[in-house]
Image: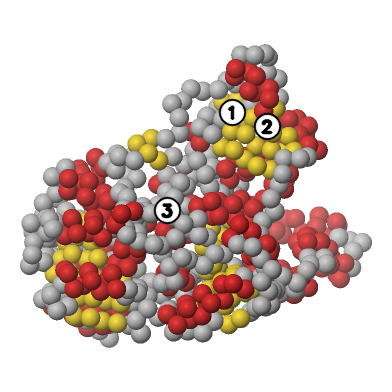
């Protein structure tokens, strides 16, 4: 039987590579777009949701149209973020692994520009780039686009939302007039329509479904709660879905960080992804998420662009996006590659109108859901545990040697007693937490709320009852606030709930600990080291006195001096901006995180415009 990709006109070398990746049948956008693009004669506009296989839709035709005997750039792919740039590059390298001489280079900010320049000088046919870094390289006259025949604008709507229009204009002006431009987008706002008009000549347009609609495999739900109950509602949704593997979207970097830290303190396997993370830190967070070593990724819109992770079960909108069209991109993180998914919005009564707007844009109706009761959550968790026990794989060779001792331990217990006690190990904490749990559902006409300030719905701690401590670790140690939280809790043998505010600095930090836990923390931190250097913890007044030379500081833990540092920032090789990983979440490991390649605006929302452009 002839392979379906071969029937579309793809060569054997590429078809075999695609088969090795496990793809057997083309997606609808690939089936429709590939034959048109293989002709190579027309400009093209493709509208399809994220997760529908757009990369292969333009990547496979490019591999058929490019002359790989020449080492000059012949195709340029522009995309909005570093993550997406790396994802596209990886995919095209995989598709072209059987093609002799094929070279694909990723060009993005936050990485060593000299290495990227070397790769370009060594010869490249396909350049995948974020706009800011691409302009830096063009400004150095380090690349010649005179042989470019194809330009692909991927996630065009997002590049405009991020303020890249001026950059796109400047980049395209360096390419030949007779090139073909292929534009792919999830939505078709007027700005994208203008790009098509300005840069394309009678383009072939292909729309999968209705313009701006959402993925048909995604269910959309919303919960109405009081603003102060948002965080409690998030926890209840997560607890009611024991197998959740999801992305939680917040509007700002600060909210992302706060939500992640509160989840970590409450014992959830979560981490934050936002703009104050270095590329190395970002890569480590994403690797943990891809490997499913993390259950919840808390992210801003920009940070999550280009995340292509399989089997995401839920997208939770902790805050609705400023730009309604951005909801399509958020929800597209789940329901990918033909799988089903659920997109959830946690809103207050004043935001129901926004839900109606989103319904009109995506062409799908939301289901108004009720937050489960405490009893419902406990029941769900209990039977999830029972299901896991029933289906666990038993390694008889390893466990048999311990069975006699296990049976002796349980000798006086009945089968029912053993089952009860085993189930209670995990179940008791949910029974305790949800005992007398209140109803968090709010009525649609509940207007007793005040603005966004209360929306985080998270417990705010005053300093009363806490002691402020100094520690000689900070952002130069590649710590985020979440990392520091985990480090202190793990080594101090205390719970995250004992920790108050964390103030991360460059070479040192301050954090608050409940008064009752201070002595235990000091005792457990004796002789603790980090990177072969003694870790010091002191009361903050003593530390300040020591640094000012006004007296003798009392050292409560393990010796070892501070190290010198010039501070937490460093310059990116080509973009000319400072970056430093000094905020974010963490969960019981000290993997770093990275900042995303952003457009010209703050993470707070999508409001576009070239006046807020920044380099990638």
Which residue occupies 65% across, 19% down?
545
Instruction: Indicate which label's residue lies in the foreground, 2 or 1.
Output: 2
In the picture, measured across the screen, residue 55 lies left or right of residue 317, that is left
CA gap, disc 2 and disc 1: 10 Å
Per the image, the residue denoted by label 3 is 602
First in sequence, mark 1 or 3: give its number.
1
Q: CA distance from mark 3 to mark 2?
A: 32 Å
Left or right: residue 39 versus residue 314 is left
Q: Position of residue 583 (x, y in %)?
A: 52, 44
Give the residue at x 79% y 67%.
437
Residue at the outermost right position: 412
Mark 3 and mark 2 lie on one chain; the one further toward the N terminus is 2
Residue on which disc 1 sits: 472
- Within 10 Å of disc 2 (Cα), the crowding (few <14, some 14-19, many 20+) is some
Answer yes or no: do the residues labelled 2 and 1 have beta carbons within 8 Å? Answer: no
At x 35%, y 85%, the residue is 209
Numbered badge on residue 547: none
How would you rate the neighbour count of disc 1 (Cα within 10 Å): few for under 14, some for 14-19, many for 20 or more? many
**Residue at the spot x=56%, y=37% of the render?**
504
The N terminus lies in quadrant: bottom left
According to the image, label 2 marks what residue?
Answer: 469
Secondary structure at badge 3 equals loop
Helix, strand or loop at disc 1? loop
* Residue 308 in the image, given as x and y percentages of width and height: 41, 64
Can the viewer see residue 541?
A: yes
For the residues labelled 1 and 3, the Cα–Cα distance comes to: 31 Å
**Secondary structure state at the residue bearing disc 2:** strand
Judged by depth in the image, the label closer to the viewer, 1 or 3, is 3
Residues at circles 3 and 2 in contact by the CB criterion of under 8 Å: no
Q: Is residue 204 above or below residue 516?
A: below
């Amino acid at each position: 039987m002839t392979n379906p990709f071969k029937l579309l006109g793809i060569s054997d070398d590429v078809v075999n590579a695609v088969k090795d990746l496990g793809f057997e049948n083309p997606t609808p956008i690939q089936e429709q777009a590939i034959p048109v693009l293989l002709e190579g004669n027309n400009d093209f506009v493709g509208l399809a949701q994220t997760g529908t296989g757009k990369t292969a839709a333009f990547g496979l035709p490019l591999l058929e149209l490019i002359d790989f005997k020449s080492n000059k750039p012949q195709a340029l792919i522009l995309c909005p973020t570093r993550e997406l740039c790396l994802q596209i590059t990886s995919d095209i390298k995989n598709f072209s692994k059987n093609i002799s001489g094929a070279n694909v280079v990723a060009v993005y900010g936050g990485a060593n520009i000299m290495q990227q320049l070397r790769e370009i000088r060594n010869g490249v046919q396909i350049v995948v780039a974020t706009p800011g870094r691409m302009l830096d390289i063009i400004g150095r006259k380090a690349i010649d686009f005179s042989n470019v025949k194809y330009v692909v604008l991927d996630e065009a709507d997002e590049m405009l939302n991020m303020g890249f229009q001026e950059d796109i204009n400047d980049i395209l002006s360096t390419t030949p007039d007779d090139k073909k431009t292929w534009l792919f987008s999830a939505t078709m706002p007027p700005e994208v329509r203008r790009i098509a008009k300005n840069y394309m000549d009678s383009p072939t347009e292909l729309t999968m479904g209705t313009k701006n609609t959402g993925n048909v495999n995604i269910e959309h739900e919303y919960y109405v709660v009081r603003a102060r109950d948002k965080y409690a509602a998030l926890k209840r949704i997560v607890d009611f879905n024991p197998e959740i593997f999801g992305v939680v979207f917040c509007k700002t970097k600060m909210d992302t960080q706060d939500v992640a830290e509160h989840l970590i303190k409450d014992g959830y396997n979560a981490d934050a992804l936002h703009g104050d993370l270095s590329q190395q830190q970002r890569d480590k967070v994403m690797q943990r998420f891809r490997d499913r070593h993390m259950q919840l990724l808390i992210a801003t819109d920009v940070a999550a662009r280009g995340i292509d992770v399989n089997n995401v079960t839920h997208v939770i909108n902790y805050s609705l996006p400023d730009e309604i069209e951005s909801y399509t991109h958020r929800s597209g993180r789940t329901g990918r590659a033909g799988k089903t998914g659920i997109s959830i919005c946690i809103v207050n009564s004043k935001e129901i109108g926004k839900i109606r707007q989103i319904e009109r844009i995506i062409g799908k109706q939301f289901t108004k859901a009720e937050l489960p009761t405490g009893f419902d959550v406990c029941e769900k968790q209990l039977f999830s545990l029972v299901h896991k026990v029933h289906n666990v794989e038993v390694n008889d060779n390893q466990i048999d040697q311990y069975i006699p001792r296990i049976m002796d331990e349980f000798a006086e217990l009945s089968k029912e007693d053993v089952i009860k006690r085993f189930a209670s190990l995990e179940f008791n904490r949910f029974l305790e937490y949800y005992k007398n749990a209140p109803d968090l559902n709010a009525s649609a006409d509940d207007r007793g709320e005040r603005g966004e300030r209360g929306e985080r719905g998270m417990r705010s701690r005053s300093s009363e009852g806490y002691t402020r401590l100094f520690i000689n670790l900070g952002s130069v140690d590649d710590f985020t606030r979440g990392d520091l939280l985990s480090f202190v809790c793990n080594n101090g043998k205390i719970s995250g709930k004992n920790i108050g505010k964390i103030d991360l600095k460059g070479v040192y930090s301050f954090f608050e600990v409940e008064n009752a836990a201070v002595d235990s923390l000091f005792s457990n931190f004796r002789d603790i080291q980090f990177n072969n250097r003694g870790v010091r913890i002191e009361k903050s007044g003593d530390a300040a006195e020591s640094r000012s030379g006004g007296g003798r500081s009392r050292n409560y833990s393990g010796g070892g001096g501070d190290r010198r540092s010039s501070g937490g920032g460093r310059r990116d090789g080509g973009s000319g901006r400072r970056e430093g990983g000094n905020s974010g979440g963490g969960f019981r490991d000290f993997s770093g995180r990275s900042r995303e390649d952003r457009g010209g605006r703050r993470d707070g929302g999508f409001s576009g415009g070239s006046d807020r452009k920044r380099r990638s």
